[in-house]
Image (cartoon, helix red, strand yellow):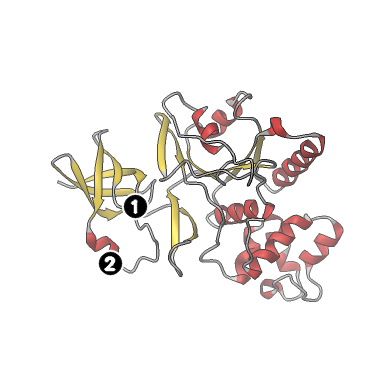
């Protein structure tokens, strides 16, 4: 008898599915699902609601139920395909650092744009604040002010030394996707949220100032009855998918409200067109130059790791 389940973990070929009876079943995907023209490297993602047939304490996933949303990035392994980080989430949280390693603003903005495309609220956790000197703290302050002004919730913290109560309050009763570069302390920060979570952590290389991948597969953890977080593998680069040039500025909140004031309206790409309201707002300081540069980089499809 088919029953509904929630995908808690994906290893690529096997999935942990929480059944309606509260039991976790190791499950596989019925082959037909993979033959339906899905342009995703992982047609079943963590957070998906699925139908499963249970046989000998194992599940066969027979159907993926409709999603309310999902977070996508460009597949690094298969051209023309996307990779689903998670499905059916309430908010998307990015852990970043301004030192050891430094997260680029281009990477941050691509993550925010990907979430904004599905109107998924965004949270920015700036970790390792204890490592910052005076200049670093000033940069942190300015970034918190910038991203708060466009509707992103920001927390500046140290996973090793600070109380994480503010984060607990933000996560309460929600399903939250957690992402970040390797080495930003994502797993360390996640481990502070619950004594039942013990994600593996590693040291930063002194030579490269970069982290190594400690989270191999996406996995959902339950903090309480209604609170879940989804940990995802460290991401080097965030490639955008399913976005056209004409719509990209819609996913920058500070641009969205101005773009129709451009001379060419919705057809304006805000690059060098005359009487462009967004270019004018950049000149006047109404739109941060870093955000506009991120937008131009996305239009040009440039690397966002630096």
Residue 174, percent from left and from top: 48, 37
- Taking the spot 81% from the left edge, 60% from the top edge, the residue there is 282
Q: Residue 12 bears which disc, if any?
A: 1
Q: Residue 173, percent across and down?
A: 47, 33
Q: Which residue is mark 2?
A: 35
For the C terminus, which image quadrant? bottom right
Give SS at disc 1: loop
Task: Tell me if residue 135 can be seen.
Answer: yes
- How many neighbours does mark 2 have within 10 angstroms: few (below 14), some (14-19), or many (20 or more)? few
Q: Seen in the image, is 61 located left or right of residue 301? A: left
279, above or below 263, in the image: above
**238 relative to 125, above or below:** below
Please provide percent x and percent y for residue 265: 70, 73
Q: In this view of the protein, can residue 287 be seen by the observer?
A: no
Q: Which of pointers 1 and 2 indicates the residue nearer the eye? A: 1
Picture quadrant where residue 215 is located: top left
**Which label sits on residue 246?**
none
Residue at (29, 63) in percent of width and height = 34
Q: Give the side of residue 285 with respect to residue 182, left or right.
A: right
Residue closest to the eye, 126 or 22 = 126
Q: Residue at 77% x, 39% y: name it.
A: 136
The image shows residue 239, relative to residue 197, as above or below, that is below
Label 2: which secondary element: helix
Query: Which badge, 1 or 2, is on the more N-terminal residue?
Result: 1
The image quarter containing residue 262 is bottom right
Indicate left or right for 110 with 263 as reference. Answer: left
Q: Which quadrant of the view contains residue 257?
A: bottom right
Q: How many marks?
A: 2
Residue at 70% x, 46% y is: 147
The residue positioned farthest toward the right in the image shown: 284
Left/right of residue 132 with respect to residue 190 in the rendered view: right
């Amino acid at each position: 008898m088919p029953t509904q389940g929630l995908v808690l973990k994906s290893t690529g070929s096997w999935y942990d599915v929480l059944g309606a009876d509260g039991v976790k079943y190791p499950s596989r995907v019925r082959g037909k699902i993979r033959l339906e023209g899905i342009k995703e490297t992982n047609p079943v993602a963590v957070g998906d609601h699925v139908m499963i047939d249970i046989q000998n304490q194992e599940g066969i996933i027979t159907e993926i139920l409709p999603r309310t949303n999902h977070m996508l990035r460009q597949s690094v392994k298969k051209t023309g395909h996307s990779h689903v980080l998670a499905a059916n989430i309430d908010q998307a949280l990015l852990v970043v650092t301004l030192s050891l390693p430094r997260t680029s603003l281009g990477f941050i903005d691509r993550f925010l744009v990907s979430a904004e495309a599905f109107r998924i609220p965004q949270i920015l956790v700036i970790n390792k604040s204890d490592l910052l000197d005076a200049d670093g703290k000033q940069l942190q302050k300015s970034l918190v002010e910038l991203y708060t002004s466009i509707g992103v919730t920001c927390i500046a913290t140290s996973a090793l030394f600070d109380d994480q109560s503010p984060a607990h309050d933000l996560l309460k009763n929600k399903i939250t996707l957690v992402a970040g570069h390797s080495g930003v302390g994502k797993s360390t920060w996640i481990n502070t949220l619950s004594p039942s979570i013990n994600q593996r952590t590693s040291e930063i290389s002194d030579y490269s100032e970069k982290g190594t991948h400690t989270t191999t597969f996406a996995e959902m953890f339950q903090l309480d009855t209604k609170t879940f977080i989804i940990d995802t593998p460290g991401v080097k680069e965030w490639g955008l998918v399913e976005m056209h040039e004409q719509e990209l500025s819609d996913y920058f909140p500070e641009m969205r409200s101005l773009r129709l004031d451009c001379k060419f309206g919705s057809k304006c790409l805000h690059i060098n067109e005359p009487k462009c309201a967004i270019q004018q707002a950049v000149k006047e300081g109404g739109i941060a130059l870093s955000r506009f540069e991120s937008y131009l980089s996305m239009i040009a499809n440039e690397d966002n790791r630096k």
